[in-house]
Image: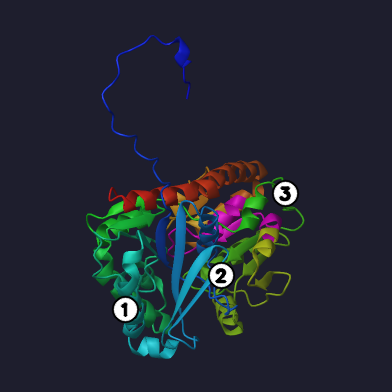
Amino acid sequence: MYLPDTDTLPLRPPRAAQTPASPPLAPARPLRVLWLAPYPYSYTPTTHPVPWVVSLAQRLAARPAEVDLTIVNWEETLRTDEEHYEQDGLHFVFLRTPRTRHDILTLYRWRVAVVARWLRRHYRHYDVIHLHGSELQLPAVVAGLPTDEVPVVLSVQGIVSECVKYVPELSWYKALWTLAGFYERRYLPHIQHFLCRTHWDSAHMQRLSPGARIHHNWEMLRPEFYAATRQPLPQPDVARNPQILFVGGHQVMKGFREALATYARLRPEMPGLQLIVAGHVGAREWAEESRRAGLLDLGPDDVQCVGNLSAAELVGWMRRCFCLLHPSYIDNSPNSVCEAQMAGLAVVASDVGGVSSLVRDDETGLLSSLQPEQLAARVRRLYHDAPLRRRLTIAAQAKALRRHHPDTIVQRTVDLYRLLSQGAG
């Protein structure tokens, strides 16, 4: 601040006594945020890595002046009721819950009660509570909390009560997802803030919780896919080695049957065409679906099952194939589609759920019905039209990079926490 030389100022009458200046304001403390999230337990290496959750947590940990993050999850192998540890700037609390069998036999009530009891003892220490997904009964855990004291926001993942409609009948999955769907319908109406990504999840949250506030943000992807955007666009050898990628194992809901049926229609007209299947594929399911599709003479030169892939391995396959085939029955914002767009792989996807929020037909990919004839027609266009493939991949990669830019996602998250903590959400 500029201060003039007092020797040059004219004399003035003395002023009345003034109130001393207020001391400078102390810097604002970071927001104390509590996550209930399926974050991997450090000592269970087989736990699902949930990369979209882990990546966001790591980015928030790098901003300690703004966010102080505690993550709560449960683990059935603990020897004590609670385990606390710190790692990479994050605070972790793991709670001992019943084994999976007992969890199911109690209809999840035991586990819900364990986490809810902990939360009621500690929620006042936090400015915001963030639930990651509704699949694991998290809305039931926070039921009854005074949200005027601590706001609660839920990031939508899948919507179990919708997805269960497409799970094969007479299966354990059907029973378990039906139970999870009951919890979802029963407790989601108590949530007043949702983080959504697509038109589809936004509409369903407004239906399930009328009057709730919908906020928008995308999810982060694995680092390997951001690195892929810095490479030249892939140039698959379609003439000599045409390959289609399907990422879904033998999951019926992900379109395993439709992928095989589509391949059966294309194989006679595309010499050397290979279907690359990523994910788990059981021998029995493979035999059944091959018979169903009329593909009784398949060999490793026709369909290659590559199993569960690391991010780097998946990027490699995406750069070798000319098309991602995603004939899913239901999806919100499938990571495989987002990752393919980042890696520069053209996408043919079924127009279901929130997929059209990711893929604009004939601009950033090709949309289709679930009919194998129509799926095959879309793949055929990509096979024969290299300029189309290039146009779609350039546009899709640029849009995906903007959509999933880490800095944007983290800033929107911090801004939302600040908004909610001020009671302005």
The three-letter code of the residue at mark 2 reads Pro
Pointer 3: residues within 10 angstroms few (<14), some, or many (20+)?
Answer: some
Instruction: Say how the picture is coloured.
Output: rainbow
Tally of numbered discs: 3
Q: CA distance from mark 2 to mark 1?
A: 27 Å
Up the image or down, 87 lies above or below 359; here it is below
> Considering depth in this image, is 373 or 93 the residue closer to the camera?
93
Q: Badge 2 is on which residue?
A: 49
Q: Which residues are magenta?
A: 317-343
The three-letter code of the residue at mark 1 reads Arg
Label 2 or label 1, whichever lies nearer to me, is 1
Residue 405 visible, this orientation: no
Give me the residue at 23% from left, 70% from top: 144
Q: Are marks 3 and 2 in contact (CB under 8 Å)?
A: no
Indicate the position of residue 301 as horizontal and vertical percent values.
73, 70
Residue 48 visible, this orientation: yes
Give me the residue at 37% from left, 72% from top: 164
Residue 71 vs residue 380: left or right?
A: left
Q: CA distance from mark 3 to mark 2?
A: 31 Å
Q: Badge 1 is on which residue?
A: 117
The three-letter code of the residue at mark 3 reads Gln
Q: Are marks 3 and 1 in contact (CB under 8 Å)?
A: no
Indicate the position of residue 84 as horizontal and vertical percent values.
49, 76
Up the image or down, 341 lies above or below 168; here it is above
In the rendered image, which quarter is residue 201 located in? bottom left
Q: Badge 3 is on which residue?
A: 235
